[in-house]
Amino acid sequence: EQRDGDQPEFLQAVREVFESLEPVVAKHPEYEANGVLERLVEPERVVKFRVAWVDDEGKTQVNRGYRVQFNSAIGPYKGGLRFHPTVTESVVKFLGFEQILKNSLTSLPMGGGKGGSDFNPKGRSDGEVMRFCQAFMTELCRHIGQFTDVPAGDINVGGREIGYLFGQYKRIRDEYSGVLTGKGLEFGGSLVRTEATGYGLCYYTEEAMRVLNNDSFKGKTVAISGSGNVAIFATEKAAQLGGKVVTLSDSNGYIHDPKGIDLDVVKDIKLGHRGRIKEYAERVAGSEYHEGCAGVWTVKCDIALPCATQNEIDGDSAKTLIANGCKVVCEGANMPSTPEAIEAYQAAGVLYGPAKAANAGGVAVSGLEMSQNSYRLSWTFEETDAKLKSIMENIVTNSLAAAKEYGHEGDLMLGANVAGFTKVADAMVAQGIL
Ligand code: NDP
């Protein structure tokens, strides 16, 4: 805490994990003897660099780039890149730290990393985004590689950006390899990667509800926040499983459609021309738009799936959700619930699926993309989707087994922390103190 006192998001993520790990460390003296916790919170490497590029007016712009290579005990560093003005070292470190345990939970051989930039792509032309991506990769390419560190997308980094980043890596390194995931299908991408986080979130939620509450999505009203990659495909799968999704949002406000969101309209707005979610209410009769994104949690629902950003549900929003009858909160975004919100869920007996477990589907299919790149083949949609579903169901099973072992039956948060940590800790002990 002394060393990273100026990094609130990072400290928030570490505190939540360490509380769960107390009984594990007590049972395993070798973790303490090998300084596992002390080493776990110190990234193996942090790279911070200048990204200079020229905008459409001919003006030089300077942004800051980051890559945190957090832990490589169980595989090459793996984690997304985020382009957003709120990106700081603290944000990248919290995401990288969470990624270590998340990647471990998928059961695939991937270490933890994360990166990004404070670049804001909103309002930027395609050419500007391309030049930014090229400048960013010109430096990043020294630090990554298919066996070292394999970045992917995150907020504002989707197929377009991964394409530009991949092109620049290939050009500088003269090497065609699976150095990034989330690639286009024409150049090594995997089917289901686009859908993976949202679909995986719903597979996880459905399985957790089945095991813990003998229940399912069928007939449930679902509130979802965000309207990006994760939110769109969570909406699609929740509807396929029989739920009715009634909200979506962006950083300006939220829409409420009591009949159920018409996803074709959303896709046309967001994927078609990168529009704002407000447009939905102008096009769909009977729906409403409200300014202020936090208002989305005042809409009555049975299941809430936050899919926008960190700390989007505070204690008050959580209490409103609970008072309105919400019984399930599973996290598509990373760390969307504040500590006060988590306390409120636990006090009210809400089924709470934490991000590192519930949203692991994206990185899981990224891991499958790496396997396909190594084999130089591609699996069908059905095959990959079936693998994703089985990984998400196993995460529920393994989390519940770990929670039970430590006397916290049914606690998906403690279970995810413990199950993810144990594998990494054992590998760190086996590899010696480094
Ligand atoms: P996108 O960029 O596709 O969408 C992000 C959405 O969240 C947009 O609707 C955006 O609105 C909204 N949003 C972003 N920042 C804020 C903010 N500060 N306040 C309110 N709304 C905000 O990103 P993704 O869908 O990929 O990512 C969403 C979340 O899911 C993130 O937490 C990410 O880390 C997490 N995640 C993503 C994975 C993936 O595979 N893509 C994997 C695992 C987790 P606006 O357009 O107004 O900015």
Image (tube, rainbow, N blue to C red):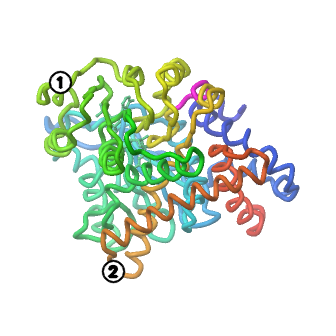
Task: Tell whether 15 sits left or right of 123.
Answer: right
Whether 225 is drawn above or below 360: the answer is: above
Give the x, y percent position of residue 91: 51, 37
Find residue 369 and report its horizontal and vertical position in percent: 39, 68
The quadrant where residue 4 appears: top right
Q: Disc 1 on helix, strand or loop?
A: loop
Specify the amino acid type for callout 2.
Answer: Leu
Asked whether 359 falls inside the magenta stretch, the response is no
Residue beneath the point at 52% across and 37% down? 335
Q: Hey, which quadrant is residue 349 in on the image?
A: top right
Residue 57, how many percent across, how many down?
13, 35
Q: What element carries label 2?
A: loop
The residue that disc 2 covers is: 377
Q: Can I make out residue 49 in this image?
A: no
Disc with the residue nearer the chain's start (1 vs 2): 1
**348 over 392 or under it: above or below:** above
Q: Give the range drawn in magenta.
A: 337-341
